[in-house]
Amino acid sequence: MGGVILNPSAVIPLSRPDITELEMEYVHEALGSDYLSGGPMGKEFEAQLASIAGTKYAVGVSSGTAALHLILLALDIKPGDEVITTPYSFIASANCILYVGATPVFCDISPDDFNIDPDLIESKISPRTKAILVVHVFGFPAQMNKICAIAQKHNLSVIEDSCEAIGARINGQPVGGGGIAGAFAFYPNKQITTGEGGVVVTNDKTVAMMARCLANQGRETGDHWLNHKHLGYNYRLDELSAALGVAQLKRLQEILASRARVAQWYENELQSEIFLSTPGSRIMKNSVISWFVYVVRFGDSSIREIAMGYLAEAGIETRPYFPAIHLQPLYQKKLGYALGSFPVTESVASTTLALPFYTKISKDQVHEVCKQLKNILRLPEITSKFDNG
Ligand SMILES: *Cc1c(COP(=O)(O)O)cnc(C)c1O
């Protein structure tokens, strides 16, 4: 409703970064050093990310999108190649395939965890397929064992878009290090932030060297064979961003624990509601979630639209995460996808909603969101939909 004037202090935002004195000290230190790019903070940040992902190498870069682009370049994925990926994600995980002139081949998701459905992947493999680009959506790890087995059988690379899932684990393995390479992102709405920033993690020395070379204008990194043979980019991570990241990483376990606590507050209040399902019901066994967002799913799309409207009027910010990528105008036009192409994705994308979720949200604020949402779900305009059939 356009006429509602909100009291800004009453607004519960969707997301907020969690910055303390520690972060300010680290950024201050970097500012006072002689390095504003290519210095010790960047090295420290990379070392810690490699440790978190369980990989030998990490290359800090300017965004998660840059990290994904560099991975595809380093794997020499090019025009004529196909990469299988999920249409239920942030658009960057598909766009990076278009950047290198290759074709994204979407594969529908599982309604159980909203990640790529391993049972559908083989039907998407063609002689042109080079890789499977997995997204651990909302910090819920995808079924890496099954996916890697399929990849191995068909000689494909597995790339992990772990941008929403730092610290998540599946079968005891941290995300990011399970395939040939993985990407993390540090935009302000992620679990930890560098302002803008990302990282490539890998156990493959060639991929690591190539990513570093291409992030730095294609400059050689000591090996003659990289001697300005390549078209590089400026995808470097600066020291101020890295310093912010190092401070945030010192607090990573605390931040992840707070987010898990917030998720549990929501679960306690919402899990028995009948017109929605909570993310707690989507946790697969053998997985450790890294809570990125708190996304509920409504019984149908009209309920979501009604709920979004009333929540906005109550000063509660929400967002319909994620719209289906294959239905974005760019993808419909370029790849010819249309409604009906991926029924599970389309059904999920039209019924999911992200509620306010961040480290410092209070129990009272969560209660307020839940109270409003429960009231909405009891309105006759919603309950009547189900009375008649
Ligand atoms: C955030 C995100 C990215 C991109 O990260 P940026 O740092 O914003 O470029 C890529 N993939 C997914 C799934 C993301 O959520």
Image: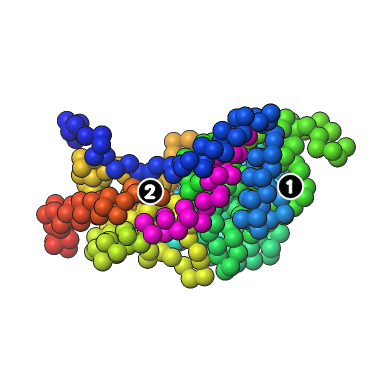
Which numbered tag is attached to residue 360?
2
Instruction: Please indicate, yes or no, whether residue 189 appears anywhere in the rendered image.
Output: no
**Disc nearer the start of the sequence (1/2):** 1
Q: Is residue 264 left or right of residue 254?
A: left
x 66%, y 31%: residue: 33
Q: Judging from the image, what secondary structure is the residue with disc 2 in? A: loop
* Label 1 neighbour load within 10 Å: few <14, some 14-19, many 20+: many
Q: Is residue 229 above or below residue 19?
A: above
Residue 371: percent from left, percent from top: 20, 54
Magenta-span inclusion, residue 261: yes
Q: Is residue 64 left or right of residue 352?
A: right
Kindly indicate the quadrant of the structure image that contains residue 347: bottom left
Q: Which residue in the structure is indicated by mark 1? A: 207
Residue type, numbered disc 1 = Val
Q: Is residue 345 left or right of residue 379?
A: right
Magenta-span inclusion, residue 223: no
Please report the bounds of the magenta region as a residue range: 238-262
Q: Quarter of the image containing the C terminus?
A: bottom left
Real-space CA distance between mark 1 and mark 2, rounded to the nearest whole angstrom: 37 Å
Q: Main secondary structure of the magenta part?
A: helix
x 55%, y 65%: residue: 170
